[in-house]
Amino acid sequence: MFWVKHVVFALLCMPLCLQIKTIVESIYIQKHLSSYYLKESQQILNKYDAAHKSIDMSAIKLGANTYDPDPLSHLHKGNFSGLTHPPRENATILMLVRNEEIEGALESMRSLEDRFNRDYHYDWTFLNDVPFTTEFKIATSAMASGKTQYGLIPVDDWNRPDWINDDKFTQCMKKMVEDNVIYGESISYRNMCRFNSGFFFRQELLKNYDYYFRVEPNVDYYCDFPYDPFKVLRERKAKYGFVISLYEYENTIPTLWDTVEDYIKEDNAKDVHMDENHIGFLTDKEKIGRYGPVTESHSNYNLCHFWSNFEVGDLNFFRSDRYIKFFNHLDQEGGFYYERWGDAPVHSIGLSLLLKQEEIIHFDEISYYHPPFNTCPTGNYARLDQRCSCDPDSEFNIDILVHSCLMRWWKNGSGKYFMKEG
Ligand SMILES: Nc1nc2c(ncn2[C@@H]2O[C@H](COP(=O)(O)OP(=O)(O)O)[C@@H](O)[C@H]2O)c(=O)[nH]1
Ligand SMILES: [Mg+2]
């Protein structure tokens, strides 16, 4: 203690009268200071204790959290209107998730809030095929900087439709298990893929939004977002943005491309305009540089797709007659159940056939991780500028692996024009 040091110093080095004076002064200052600090800290304790108590007792959704520079602002403002953020688009972040995935959901939320949404406070919409637990709602609401809402998916939008033949379904599933098809044994995974292909955008909670940003549990964003991807879509009149593109396992979709070719024939160039869409991205199998497609395909489809666990998209496109017509054509073949068609190839084929080149964007600057792959900006300056925490030379950086379809996108999509020359 500092006054003890003063007393010892006084006793050793000073004449007696000075010693007495210094000792008295030290003891006085110490007493005075401790009572001052004690009083101050008591006051602070009371103030924040009271604030915390009123937080605990307020409505579940706070609408402000630790990302808010003044986390107690709603107490003195009486509402959340004091929060400021840049202009927002009519958009929501969207997570289809199970109650038991709560930790992974919170991890993804923490990351996206830190890297992007803390500045915008976009709403979060959660969807589930069973009701969300109170625990899930409380924890995710506390993590969100925007409003949160929770939807129960109607049974008909989730379950296997009646017209799927049960015997055929059981037989096909058994065969897929024997062939070690990924998720070949799972009924719920099939429900999820069909839901994401044809029903997510029809959910009641989404009907007033224009854009969505799909997020899954256990994903990570390694760099600060340099822009609002919703705004980029709107300003560039684009309908869809992706970050990762790779090859699909052909044994999950043996007859998908035949069905797509039927659809193209039937459409008869009404909705599908081959001169301005991305057909090349889906069918180009030539070598690019030293690399041909790594996955063998037995149809004209090269198996390239946008990895749909990350999507920023225009809900109005998915709600449009042309997309629904495309989805219905596929759905009636039963391949979501007799095979194991994923929403990633279905979205990717629909988007690539129906949209113009410039309507799909590769978000080059957004760094993302979904097990087992990630993306990471190669430029050192970009990584520093965006506070990235990733290694572009990592063996899991998909962009530098042969499994990536990005080079096919650069060549045939709307990016990297140098690939198209010569
Ligand atoms: N509510 C609900 N969500 C599911 C179900 N199955 C998968 N999901 C969600 O669908 C998305 C994709 O599932 P995931 O297990 O991550 O598949 P993967 O990324 O293809 O391995 C994730 O957001 C999951 O939380 C399910 O049965 N119910
Ligand atoms: Mg996943």
Image (cartoon, rainbow, N blue to C red):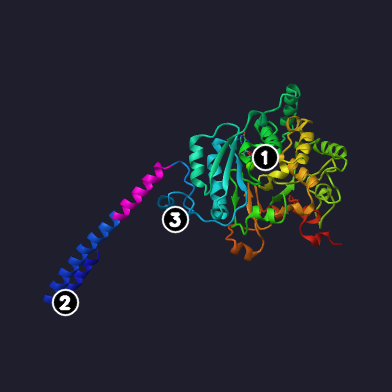
Q: Which mark is residue 14?
A: 2
Please tell me how crowded label 2 is: few (under 14), some (14-19), or many (20+) other residues with Cα within 10 Å.
few
Q: Earlier in the sequence, mark 1 or mark 2?
A: 2
Give the residue at x 34% y 49%: 49
| Residue bearing the label numbered 3 | 70
Q: In this picture, is 116 found above or below 155? A: below
- The x, y position of residue 350, in whole percent, is 77, 43
- The x, y position of residue 210, in whole percent, is 66, 46
- The x, y position of residue 416, in whole percent, is 77, 60
Q: Nearer the viewer, residue 310 or 69?
A: 69
- The x, y position of residue 1, in whole percent, is 24, 63
Q: Earlier in the sequence, mark 2 or mark 3?
A: 2
Residue 131 occupies quadrant = top right
Q: How many marks can you see? A: 3
Q: In this picture, is 107 found above or below 24? A: above
Q: Overall secondary structure of the magenta stretch?
A: helix
Please tell me how crowded label 1 is: few (under 14), some (14-19), or many (20+) other residues with Cα within 10 Å.
many
The disc labelled 3 sits on which kind of residue? Asp
Q: Is residue 51 magenta?
A: yes
The answer to whether one can see residue 401 in this image is no
- State the extent of the magenta-drawn residues as a range: 43-58
The residue carrying mark 3 has its beta carbon less than 8 Å from ligand 1:
no
The image quadrant where one finds the C terminus is: bottom right
In the rendered view, does 96 fall on the left or right side of 291?
A: left
| Residue bearing the label numbered 1 | 201
Q: Which mark is residue 158?
A: none
